[in-house]
Amino acid sequence: MAEKGFLINGYTHPVDINPFEKKENGTILRKVDAERGRLNLPLFNRHGIKDRNGVMTCATCHNPHSRRKSDVKEALSIGAKKGSTTPFLRENAPAICAECHRNKFDIAYTKHNLAKVAPEERNVLNQTVAESGLCGSCHLTHSAQKSFLWARQMSDGSDRFAENLCNGCHYNEGMASKKQVGPYSHPLGVIPAEKGMTTLLPLFDSQGDISATGMMTCYTCHDPHHWDPGKMAKDDPVAMEGSALNSFLRMKNAPSSKLCGDCHKAQAVIENTDHDLTVTAPQFRNTMGRTGMEAGTCGICHLAHNANNLQRLWAVGFGPGEHVMDRMCNSCHSPDGPAANKIPQISSHPRENIVNVGREISGHTGYFPLFDHDTGEKAVVGNISCPSCHAVHQWNPSVFEKGKGVKVEGDATNSFLRDKLEDMLCKDCHGDDALFRFKYYHKATARHLGGVQPNDNKSANPVK
């Protein structure tokens, strides 16, 4: 009986679900925010009788008696432009979407509202946003693509569905071509559970469905419906340039880097220590020209997107020295850096490779990492550099906590030193003399210099 043009193909909005039950696996993601006292749409029990504790059915959104069949084509042809009026709907779109998804409507005041930034762009049904409505520019209730009921062309550059949604706009020929993610960016496809990490951020399987053991995608850190995680934006979305405070982030990332710290808990204790530049060098700017208050405790040193190099997604530049890891440290610990008053007299170690089997596993007793001289990657056979002895994110190896927000003068029990130094690698070569050598490593007058002079790290080689 239904005409061919009205058949439902592809994926459609789920039915037989209770809109009041949240199924986001303990994440901060909320797909639905329906409330029993506010929902104006009917729910039904298994006998088809209206029941406020029932489930969604076709009749939840559709009233089969509201239109005559002869009105359908006319309503479809003119309805969308008059507020997406569709035959048999109990409410017009997008108001009917807001019954259950009111928490998504902040998008109207963002750059993701195509009516503001790309009014001529069309969805897979060849509709502009004026024809489809606010939600319909990206989502279809019926005849949609899999996951997210997607209504736009997707990229096929990844095997991760959620990532392809974003890249359908954020690519060279896309409407968001000016906001692309470069090759030196935070990796995607990472599975936090495999690294022993836990997070409140949503993770996804390869099909774009939420999974507690899933992988990280764009949608893990970014909420495309909310420009500012703390408030609704009401300024001109076209004029807004993002920062770590907004940019569709799920958590504010400045000045406290809560977003980064939700996964990287071991590194989050850097906050309010001497290595937190929001505390010790608030006027210092990274390679993006941002201060710590603007970029956040983590973002002042690391760029989640579009870094200039792969090494630690470094955002500060490179100081003098030969070993790439030393040069990262020397970018601050140099005469023109924010740690100019903390330059060691001497900090070099012979470049010869050292074998480090047994102490290269993070979290194990006696952890003492070595790093490749040129790439900075952790290595079983590598070179000693600054972060071999110093855990740059944790001030006191015996106390796992954030700092007090004031500058502290360190000693041999803290100063970002690693724990269990009595088992350090130095003993393998230096035997009983290792402790003395370690204690006076930065004291030029106490070392057997062998021709190496104080402040020996003046040369600066290009980073590969």
Image (spheres, rainbow, N blue to C red):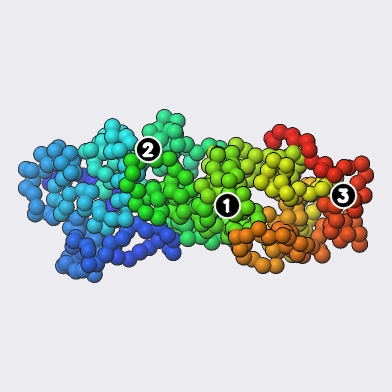
Write down the residue under mark 3: 444
Check residue 239 in the rendering and tell me which mark sits there, or answer none: 2
Foreground residue among 122 and 337: 337
Q: x, y percentage for residue 417?
A: 74, 59
Residue 138 at x, y = what percent? 32, 43
| Residue at numbered disc 1 | 278
| Crowd band around label 2 with a 10 angstrom C-alpha radius: few (<14), some (14–19), many (20+) | few
Q: Nearer the viewer, residue 290 or 34?
A: 290
Q: Amino acid at mark 1?
A: Thr
**Is residue 207 among what the camera can see?**
no
Give the camera-side residue of 231 and 169.
Answer: 231
Amino acid under disc 2: Ala
Whichever of labels 3 and 2 marks the residue nearer the N terminus, that label is 2
Tag of residue 229: none
263 left or right, relative to 312: left
Disc 2 versus disc 1: distance between alpha carbons? 27 Å
The residue sitting at 19% across, 55% down in the picture is 61
**Of marks 3 and 1, which one's residue comes earlier in the chain?**
1
SS assignment at label 3: helix
> Label 1 crowding class (10 Å Cα cut-off): few <14, some 14-19, many 20+?
many
Q: In which quarter of the view is residue 415 placed? A: bottom right
**Residue 381 in picture, x, y percent from top left:** 78, 48
Please say if the residues under marks 3 and 1 sit with CB atoms less than 8 Å apart.
Answer: no
Q: Residue at x 6, y 43 (%)?
A: 70
Real-space Cα separation, disc 3 to disc 1, in angstroms: 32 Å
- Image quarter of residue 429: bottom right
